[in-house]
Amino acid sequence: MTESTDSKQSLKLFIVLSRAYKAMNEMSNRFIQEQGLNPTEFAVLELLYHKGKQPLQKIGGKILLASGSITYVVDKLEKKGYIRRVASPNDRRVTYAETTEAGDTFMSNIFPIHEEKIHELMTVLTSEEQEQTIELLKKLGLSIKDLSY
């Protein structure tokens, strides 16, 4: 391939990846919104549900959200009764967020459905193709962190 053809192929790959992500994300977000949450609220609730209580200061980095937005999202989830803030007994500068019983019940009801819907989206690929895609996307993602743009 020539450099021009290589560049066109790279752009095509970028467009295909972007469109595939957009389509999958829209399907996933539709289900989340039907449950009365926005995608960011779901991401925070899912993190706390699967990983347990987390310092508020660390949540943004774990779900790729600006730290200023965390307070807003946590406030909304707290008003819905799904999470609560808990002061650290060891460091008064640290506040944790954790799920409530209502939050755990809500997630235990909807997460299996969410997981199944994601699985349905992916079944167009065989298990082997899924594994190959995972490895290729990891390779791509890890190589990018070393580049300056």
Image (cartoon, grey):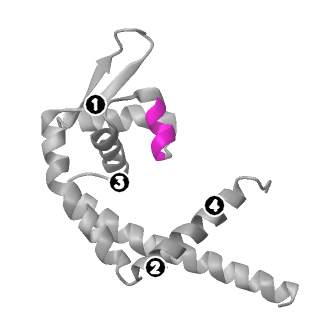
Residue 57 painted magenta: no
Nearer-N-terminus badge (3/4): 3
Q: Residues within 10 Å of mark 2 (few under 14, many from 20)?
A: few
Which x, y percent locates residue 122? 37, 76
In the rendered image of this protein, does residue 90 appear above or below residue 108? above
* Pointer 4 local density, CA inside 10 Å: few below 14, some 14–19, many at least 20: few
Give me the C-alpha separation between circle 1 and circle 2.
37 Å
- Specify the amino acid type for callout 3: Pro
Q: Residue visible at 26% across and 59% down?
A: 33
Point 30% across, 43% down: residue: 50
Is label 1 in a helix, a strand or a loop?
strand
Q: According to the image, label 2 marks what residue?
A: 128
Q: Which mark is residue 141?
A: 4
Find the distance from the CA under tag 3 to the CA under tag 4. Answer: 22 Å
In the image, what residue type sits under mark 1? Glu
Pointer 1 residue:
98
Q: Is residue 63 left or right of residue 81?
A: right
Quadrant including the C terminus: bottom right
First in sequence, mark 1 or 2: give its number: 1
